[in-house]
Amino acid sequence: MPESLKIAIDKNTNIANVKLAGRLDVYNVSRILAQFNAQTNGQHFKKLLLELSEVSYFDSAGAALVIEIERFCKEQKCFFSITGMTKDIKNFLSLIDINSLANPVKFITPPREGIIIRTGKATLKLADDIKNIIIFIGQVTIALLYAVAHPKCVRWGDILVIFERAGVNAVPILITIQFLIGVILALLGAGQLKQFGAEIYIANLVAIAMVQELGPMITAVLVAGRSGAAFAAEIGTMKVSEEIDALESMGINPQHFLVIPRIIAVTLAMPCLLLIANVAGIVGGIVTVMLFLNIPLSMYITQTLNSIDMYIIFQGFLKSIIFAILISGVGCMRGFEVKGGAGNVGLSTTSAVVSGIFLIVVFNGVFTVIFNS
Amino acid sequence: MNKPSDKFSNSIIQVCNLTTGYGDLIIHKNISFNIEKGEIVAICGGSGCGKSTLLRHMIGLETPKSGDILIDNESIVNANQKEKLKILTKTGVLFQSGALFGSLTLAENIKLPIKEYTNLPSETIEILVQLKLEMVNLSGFENYLPSEISGGMKKRAGLARAIALDPMILFFDEPSAGLDPVSSADLDNLILQINKSLGATIVIVTHELASIFEVAERVIMLDKETKSIISDGTPEDLKRDKTNRQTYDFFNRIPSIIERSND
């Protein structure tokens, strides 16, 4: 049976008989409703009787149509009643209280907070973040001092595993990046220094840039991206799956158990990585010079060795150790901050990398000022 | 601070005038109860009534707004770090997910608390681990990682870790959640066995009626609206007691949404 709407109005009694037929589904209801609105526009009834006996299919869309008609009646204060409900319609309508739905509910989308409130909240969050970082640094320092005083309590087995993951496994990508940076630096330097016939100073440029600045920085950024993120995700997931609660309920300090091995492992791995990074960068410079410039290898190497002294090497290694503590510490801290579900683990991981890189750049600036003043 | 009366001094857990919450939200308001040694008590109530929150306070993971919780006559609320560790050795917890450490094998998971608190030689620790796994019917799974075993086995392994130090009190957070009826019944049996063989006091947070009737000797029912305890008694009594509508509906699975008739 095709869907249809028939409205018969008794002029004497002012009673409207509305008869619906056929399928009342999402595809037909809007057309029927438009017909109903057009035919009843401007009319006032005393009574409206809705006849549903010829409806062959009825779902939520049909119910919505019935509610629309009921609301129309309520507005006009006319009596509304449904007749001829089939068993299916009765079953469907038994799930809802059709009378309570006759009153429209106002749907409100919560307004977006104003810029002042958002700025205030962000400032409070930042202050809270700084407070948490200070608390965390304090807790980690205490835990590290405890580890120094009680080396037997340190989980050395875990340290080896983390050292392998954070250090050894990072070597191939680190060599590739540093080698290419060495190549880029040498080529850039060659272009400029050639104009003054000072190509030999490419050796100084590459060596000092690598050992003092780029080596520690690029290594730290790489470790922040690999291990800082991994620590945040790992500890965050442990928090979500109640493993941190389990540790606390067993009276085991999560800082001793999870943070200390990670900080020690990364602090041990970082100088090793820096050494490899420096060598890879300098080799990149050597290969470029060999391929594109006419400088003897022995001369280049002598120039490289002369350009770097123990002070520059010390600066690089000191930075790398501080960066290691910052990256691993902030990675673990972001993991501990996870509350709720998996979505927050993702946010914490992102935050670990961003905070890690931010701290690296800030501290690198501080070191540059200290070492050059 | 309310001190427990002498009448209850034999109680192993005493919750005195406890008010808990987060920020401005109050979850429990001034609740008090005692649990006697060797009792199996179920803490139940509808979703969101604060069952798990109460458990987290009892194991010292959260600090209440006011009131006190005494475990074996020692306050876990006011304990310093050292005292808290001492109290925690008397308790074991099985978390909802099992909370096994994913990077450690089952044996290593169970070894962890034993190593942390004892100076036993490694051979003895290994025997203990075997023993605990045998108690939960997981012999032969010593070297499996948590990711390699089923949900029911994870819970049993979590239980083996919880009883590693033979605690006086065992807390269970929704032990039946996510388990098939057979695994759930297995776990119920284990709870009864552990109560019988170790004499442990058992506190279970659950809303699984089958488990409550199977294991619990006493039920403490919490209510979300009043933020307090609305019933305390044996599961059978609470099921029959028609005077308390909420408890009666809960134990007889009476839906709050009554079928509508559209005549």
Image (spheres, coloured by chain):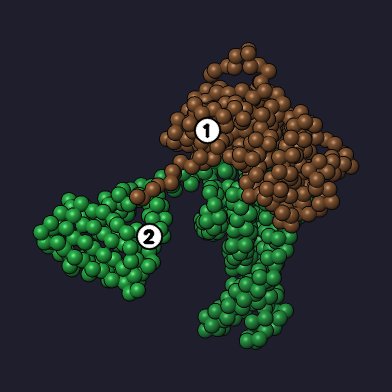
Chain colours: A green, B brown
Image quarter of residue A220 = bottom right
A129 and A289: which is toward the camera: A129
Side of A218 relative to A114 (left or right)? right
Residue B146 position, x and y percent, is: 72, 53
Give the residue type that dot 1 points to: Tyr
Chain of the residue under the numbered disc 2 shown in the image: A
Residue A225 position, x and y percent, is: 59, 62
Side of B238 relative to B198 (left or right)? left
Chain of the residue under the numbered disc 1 shown in the image: B
Residue B207 position, x and y percent, is: 58, 39
Side of B124 relative to A174 (left or right)? right
B38 and A283: which is toward the camera: B38
Residue lying farthest left?
A: A12
Label 2 sits on a secondary structure element that is: loop
Residue at horizontal 81 percent and vertical 52 percent from the top: B141
- Say which quadrant the N terminus of chain A sits in: bottom left
B28 and B182: which is toward the camera: B182
> Circles 1 and 2: CB distance less than 8 Å?
no
Residue A142: in sight, yes or no?
no
The residue beneath circle 2 is A86
Residue at horizontal 64 percent and vertical 82 percent from the top: A289
Relative to residue A153, is residue B72 depicted above or below? above
Residue at horizontal 66 percent and vertical 69 percent from the top: A174
**Marks 1, 2: nearer the viewer:** 2
Q: Residues within 10 Å of mark 2 (few under 14, many from 20)?
A: some
The residue beneath circle 1 is B248
Image quarter of residue A178 = bottom right
Relative to residue B75, is residue A314 depicted above or below? below
Residue at horizontal 25 percent and vertical 69 percent from the top: A5
Residue lying farthest right?
A: B123
Residue lying farthest top?
A: B6
A311 and A271: which is toward the camera: A271
